[in-house]
Structure formats: C-alpha cells, structure tokens
Amino acid sequence: TPTAQTGFLKKAARVLAEDSPSDWLWLLGNNQVARKSVTGFPTNSVGDAYTVANIVKG
C-alpha cells in the first residue's frame, strides 16, 4: 500500500542518514603512487586531473 511504502522509505532514509555513507563513499582521498624514478607529475595536487606531457620515466 502507499502508506506502507511511505513508512519503508522513511525507515530507509533514516538508516542512510545515520550511516552517513557519503562520508566514506564520496569523500575518499585522491591518492597517487609513483616510483622514485618517475618525475614531472604534480605533487600535493588537489585536482583529479593533470597534464601528463611533463611526466618522465628516468
């Protein structure tokens, strides 16, 4: 019934609000790893993209 459905949706919304999945699902750190011999990439970058033209494997 629509009333039962509304109740289930309210319960689901409460579970999501209490678990705060956005804290672990969308707020992950942006990590990158490279060998010491790889140079030219930005360090401590806050963006999710950068130019790869300067990257060199030494």
Image (spheres, rainbow, N blue to C red):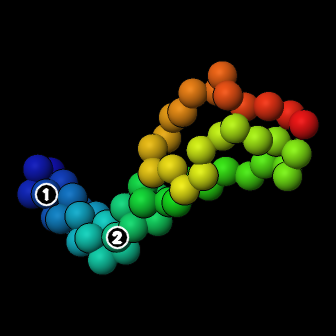
Relative height, residue 29 to residue 56 (above, below): below
Image position of 33 (left or right of 1)? right
Q: Which mark is residue 6?
A: 1
Residue 34: x and y in percent read 78, 48
Relative height, residue 55 to residue 11 (above, below): above
Marks 1/2: CA distance? 21 Å
**Mark 1, residues whose alpha carbon is within 10 Å: few (<14), some, or many (≥20)?**
few
Choose top left, top right, bottom left or bottom right for residue 44: bottom right
Residue 8: x and y in percent read 23, 62
Classify the position of the C terminus by image quarter: top right
Please give the residue where the numbered disc 2 appears in the rendered image: 20
Please indicate, yes or no, whether residue 15 appears anywhere in the rendered image: no
Image position of 26 (left or right of 6)? right
Image position of 51 (left or right of 56)? left
Image position of 18 (left or right of 33)? left
Residue type pointed to by label 2: Ser
Please indicate, yes or no, whether residue 20 appears anywhere in the rendered image: yes
Choose top left, top right, bottom left or bottom right for residue 3: bottom left
Residue at the image point whose x is 86% and y is 34% from the top: 57
Residue 5: x and y in percent read 18, 54
Residue type pointed to by label 1: Thr
Residue at the image point whose x is 51% and y is 50% from the top: 45
- Please state which of the two labelled residues, at mark 1 or mark 2, is closer to the viewer: 2
Front in this rendered view, residue 25 or 52: 52
Report if the CB atoms under discs 1 and 2 are less than 8 Å apart: no
Front in this rendered view, residue 28 or 37: 37
